[in-house]
Image (tube, rainbow, N blue to C red):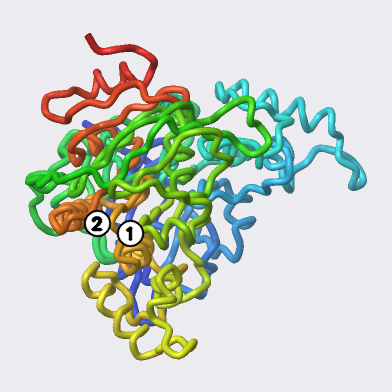
Amino acid sequence: MPEQKSILLKISNVTKHFPGTKALDNVNLDVYEGEIHAICGENGAGKSTLMKILSGVYPYGTYEGQIHFAGSEVKLATVKDSEQIGIRIIFQELTLVPNMTVADNILLGAEPGKRGIINQNQLFSDTERLLKDYNLDIPYNAKVSGLGIGQQQMVEIAKALSGNARLLILDEPTSALTIDETNVLMDIIRDLKSRGVTCIYISHKLDEVFEIADRITVLRDGQIVETHPVEDLDQNKVISLMVGREITNQYPPRKPNIGDVTLEVKNWTVAKHSQAARPTVKDVSFKLHKGEILGISGLMGSGRTELVQSIFGEFGKRLSGELILNGEPVTIGSAEDAIRHGLALLTEDRKQTSLILKHSILANATIASIQDLVRYNVIDPEKELAVTYEYKDKLQIKAPTVHSIVNNLSGGNQQKVAIAKWLMTDPQVLIMDEPTRGIDVGTKYEVYKLMNELTSQGVSIIMVSSELPEILGMSDRILVMHEGTVAGIVENDNVSSEEIMLLATGGSLR
């Protein structure tokens, strides 16, 4: 007779409304003590909303239904309430204080000391011990602002582990992590399970879900679709449950029509303004053709983002090299120059550098092309409204109106707004840095189809991605970077992920 598992978390009939939409619709879910329970669903399915209810971000009274934890009904009013009963959450958006140290952030609000005076030595020693306990290679006394995104994410994880968590919620925890950092996190989660900690794991990366989860629940349109043990499912079944239809291929068929060279980068060397002696990008040369998707791969810190940002005029100081656009040398010293020459850059961090979250879809979508909407030195409101609705419909942005605030949209719809912003500039070269980070399988497929449509119209695309399947699934050619240099440029006909990784780690193909 199978062992009866005890229920740690019971969610009963939970419904949550936002203006114009029902984010959660009568959700019922049991999470067992000591299990790793994955929750999958498209952006906008209600995953993050449910987690914010469980963590006290959306307090009791703003939703209908009941939450029981460890056998008792809980009515959480704040995040602190949830932490006090043992619920800890790692949000998809980082919540760190940049100008404070790693130790200050990890023990923020729980600093050791007496009479309001913090014991700095104990603060540092407690943090160092925690980091070593979980094999997190992060200096405890470093300022968070000086860390990379991946390291900051690991600090966020350590912060959640600093309390006595009974339930740890991880919302897209590996979206900014390297492969090695992701492996460390998987080991941490397994260790926590062995210590009796229950985990809710949310990720669009299904390979991670199947590696770590005991059970999988699929949410769609705010409702629970099904819950199954992981061994009863496969990735295709989960995808079909998520999107409500069968998707036989994750990448749409591509029929490239490659033309002449649009952009040539020659001997491109760039350094941070204060570090001219140590270039971040060193002697990079490549050509980009009309209608081509050039994938850029490489490990975190290889210089991929710095390369594309510097081409766009928004990173560092050019020490040498030139840009040739349609056969003519050009000088690009700012985003304004880049836009004027027909370049567009979709940045890797949509929340920090791509969107103004407190503004509307309309304000965000038109900001890069506002000059095209001006008549007699005044913005034409009718034209602005019409073109924004045109792209809202074209990209299927799910929102009641174009006046909806971007911060209230799902991650996938936020990404579509960011894409719309650049498409409105009518670019001939579209640079996309991590274009599908943090968005669901269905929305990814829509982005891929859009990329194919754009290249069929003659747009040239540079796509930076940390996902090797994405690089191999969408690129015509692949440029691999290693320590700021070009390790190789290969045709994507029969190249393997192992060969790409060999180049990315400093090896060579024979």
**Residue 35 vertical position relative to residue 417 in the rendered view, above or below:** above
Where is residue 102 shown, x and y percent of the image? 68, 36
Would you say residue 16 is visible in this rendering? yes
Rendered image quadrant of residue 395: bottom left
Seen at 65% across and 31% down, the residue is: 275
Residue 71 in the figure: left or right of residue 293: right
**Which residue, as the protein is rendered here, is positioned at the far front?**
328
Would you say residue 12 is visible in this rendering? no
**Residue 502 vertical position relative to residue 204 in the rendered view, above or below:** above
Three-letter code, disc 2: Thr
- Comparing 327 with 486, the one in front is 327
Quarter of the image containing the N terminus? top left
Q: Secondary structure at mark 2?
A: helix
**Residue 215 vertical position relative to residue 382 in the rendered view, above or below:** above
Say few, some or many: other residues with alpha carbon within 10 Å of mark 1 (under 14 / 14 to 19 / 20 or more): many
Residue 182 in the figure: left or right of residue 91: left
Residue 320 in the figure: left or right of residue 97: left
Residue 280 in the figure: left or right of residue 43: right
Whether label 1 touches label 2, CB < 8 Å: yes
Quarter of the image containing the C terminus? top left
Three-letter code, disc 1: Gly
* Of callouts 1 and 2, the N-terminal one: 1
Where is residue 401 shown, x and y percent of the image? 34, 82
Residue designated by label 2: 443
- Comparing 152 with 416, the one in front is 416
Seen at 30% across and 79% down, the residue is: 387
Where is residue 11 shown, x and y percent of the image? 38, 59
Spatial distance from mark 1 to mark 2, Cα to Cα? Answer: 6 Å
Residue designated by label 1: 412
